[in-house]
Amino acid sequence: MLGNGITIASPRPVATSAAPVGQVFLSGDLVRYRVVPGAGAPVVRISQDGAIEALHPGTATIEGRFGKSVDRFEVIVREENQ
């Protein structure tokens, strides 16, 4: 969630594997992100280093790719003091 003075965030990618490995934290350089197109103007943009920057209030879906693996997550941008 972005808002209340926080306008930029960086995802912390994690790969989950069966035991005994479990969770493995990935370097952000290994994951490629994109904003999934939606209705209206984009709510966020993603810089070349993977940082997510808020543009205006709303909800965006971000897609991350690591090799052949793909996942999506939602980002909410709130008005200031909301």
Image: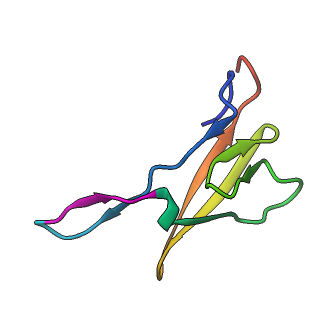
Tell whether position 63 is magenta: no
- Judging depth in this view, the residue of 58 and 65 nearest the camera is 65
In the rendered structure, the answer to whether residue 28 lies left or right of residue 52 reads left
In the rendered structure, the answer to whether residue 76 lies left or right of residue 70 reads right
Instruction: Please report the residue visible at 20 percent of the width from the left and 61 percent of the height from the top.
Output: 22
In the rendered structure, the answer to whether residue 45 lies left or right of residue 29 reads right
26 vs 52: above or below: below
- Judging depth in this view, the residue of 75 and 52 nearest the camera is 52
The C terminus, quarter of image: top right
Instruction: Provide residue 35's location: percent of width, then percent of height.
Output: 71, 61
Instruction: Provide residue 51's location: percent of width, then percent of height.
Output: 63, 48
Instruction: Please report the residue visible at 71 percent of the width from the left and 53 percent of the height from the top.
Output: 47
Farthest residue toward the bottom? 68
Instruction: Please report the residue visible at 82 percent of the width from the left and 38 percent of the height from the top.
Output: 56
Q: What is the span of residues highlighted in magenta in the rendered image?
A: 21-27
The answer to which image quadrant residue 8 occupies is: top right
The N terminus, quarter of image: top right
Farthest residue toward the top? 81
Instruction: Provide residue 76's location: percent of width, then percent of height.
Output: 65, 41
Farthest residue toward the right? 40
Instruction: Provide residue 77's location: percent of width, then percent of height.
Output: 70, 37
